[in-house]
Amino acid sequence: MEERKLLHSFLAKSQKGLPPRRMKDSYIEVLLPLGSQPELREKYLTVQNTIRFGRILEDLDSLGVLICYMHTKIHSAKMSPLSIVTAQVDKIDLCKTSLGPEHDIKFSGHVSWVGKTSMEVKMKMCQLHGDEFCPVLDATFVMVARDSENKGPAFVNPLIPESPEEEELFRQGELNKGRRVAFTSTSLLKMAPSAEERTTIHEMFLNTLDPKTISFRSRVLPPKAMWMENSKLKSLEVCHPQERNIFNRIFGGFLMRKAYELGWATACNFGGSRPFVIAVDDIMFQKPVEVGSLLFLSSQVCFTQDNYMQVRVHSEVASLQNREHTTTNVFHFTFMSEKEVPLVFPRTYGESMLYLDGQRHFNSMSVPVNLRKDYLVEP
Ligand SMILES: CCCCCCCCCC(=O)SCCNC(=O)CCNC(=O)[C@H](O)C(C)(C)COP(=O)(O)OP(=O)(O)OC[C@H]1O[C@@H](n2cnc3c(N)ncnc32)[C@H](O)[C@@H]1OP(=O)(O)O
C-alpha cells in the first residue's frame, strides 16, 4: 500500500483529461485449457464430473477487473494508479449447454459503457465442442474505479462507440443504469408492494389459515408446501489473508463462490434433487470485506414456481473484536430442479416481502423460463 500511495500523481483531475478509448481497446480473450491441461481440472471439478460454477464466478470477477485495467491503461506508467472494485453483478444468464470438464473454455469481454467513475463490462464464456466454441453464459458486471489507496472515487477514460452495434451496446448500458436506479427506488425496503403483489400475499395467507378454526392465528401448510423459515441454511467463513485481493480486501469472487455454494446447497435441500443454476442477478457489493473478518452467510428459498427456485443469500461481517454485524452483499440465484419443487410459504410480513422480492427477481430473467431445460452447471 505504501507503494500505491506514490501513484496518486497519475490520477486524472477530470474525465476530460483522459484519452477516450474504444471497445476494442479493452477486448480480451482468455483461454482456460481444461481440455488440453488436465491437471487444471481438479480445481474446477464437481463430484458429478461437471464444472464448479463457483469457480467460474471467481474467474469472471478477475476477468472483469482485468478488462477495466485494459480500458484505463496508462501506457507511460508501470502500475495503474486505479483500484478497480466490483460494485455489482448485474446479470449472468446461462445458455442451454452442458459444461463438461474435458473441454477448453474461452472467456472474452470488453467495457460496454462508462459513467464518470464506473464501467459496465460485458463478458462471454464459450466451451469447445468439436472444432467450435459454443456459448455457455453471458455476464454483465459493473466495476468502480477508486484512487490508488481505494479511499475515494477516480475518473475513468471516456468510451467512444465506433459502429451502430457498439452504439446500441452503449445505449443499453445507459438503460441498464436507469433500470438499476428504478429497481432500487421501487425496492420493498422503500415502497409498499403493488396492488397485485398485495393480493398475491393475501391469497397465500388465506391459503394457510386452518379452516377448522375461525382464527387468523392458526396456520397450516397446504399440501406440497414448506414454510420459508424452514428452507434456511447458514454458514460462517473466517476471511483468511489467502483470500485477499490486490487491495488487501477480501476477493469478491471468493465471496460469490461461498454464497453460491451455500445457495446451491439450500436449493438442493429444499428441492430434494440436483439443482442447476440458470441465472444470477443483482449482486451488490455494498461494503468491502476486511481480511480477518467473520463472514456470516444466510441463505433461503424465497420464491418457487414449477421446477424453479429463487434463492437469496445474505452476507454480513463482524470483526473478532467488534460484535456489530454489517451487511456486505445480497446475492440472488435462480435454480432449476430436476423435478417439481414444493411451494414456499411466507409466515411473517417480512418473509412476504422476501417472497415478492424473489418473484421480482425471477420475473426479471431475460430468457423465457420454458427454454431452460438440460443444464449441467453445479457448485
Ligand atoms: C489484474 C486482474 C486481476 C485482479 C483480480 C482482483 C479482483 C479484485 C476485485 C475485487 O475483489 S473487489 C472486492 C469486491 N467489491 C468490493 O469490496 C466493493 C465494495 N463496495 C464499495 O467499496 C462501494 O460500495 C463502491 C466503491 C462500489 C461504491 O461506493 P459509493 O457508493 O461510495 O460510490 P459513489 O456514490 O461514489 O459512486 C461511484 C460510482 O459507482 C457507481 N455505483 C455505486 N454503487 C453501484 C452499484 N451497486 N451498482 C452500479 N454502480 C454503482 C455510481 O453510480 C458511481 O458511478 P459514476 O461515477 O460513473 O456515476
Image (spheres, grey):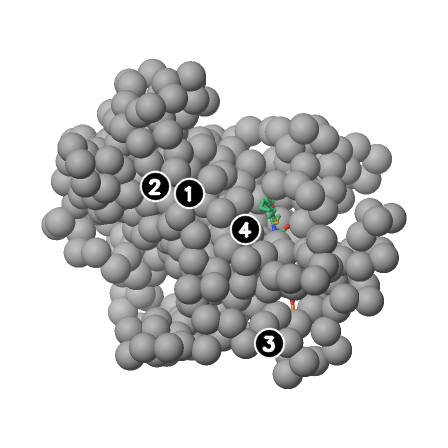
Q: Residue at x 40, y 55 (%)?
A: 109
Decide if ligand 1 comes within 8 Å of the CB at mark 4. yes
Left or right of 240, for residue 55 = left
Mark carried by residue 19: 3
Q: Quadrant of residue 77?
A: bottom right
Label 4 sits on residue: 66
Q: Amino acid at mark 1?
A: Val
Label 2 sits on residue: 106
Total residue callouts: 4
Distance from Cα at disc 2 to Cα at disc 4: 15 Å
Q: Amino acid at mark 3?
A: Pro
Q: Residue 142 placed where, x, y %?
A: 50, 61
Label 1: how many Cα within 10 Å (few below 14, some 14–19, many 20+)? few
Q: Quadrant of the C terminus?
A: top left
Distance from Cα at disc 1 to Cα at disc 2: 6 Å
Q: Residue 278 placed where, x, y %?
A: 28, 44
Mark carried by residue 30: 1
- Label located before the other in sequence (3 or 2): 3
Left or right of 8, for residue 18 = left
Q: Residue 377 placed where, x, y %?
A: 29, 33
The answer to the question of whether label 3 and label 1 lie on touching residues, with beta carbons closer than 8 A, is no
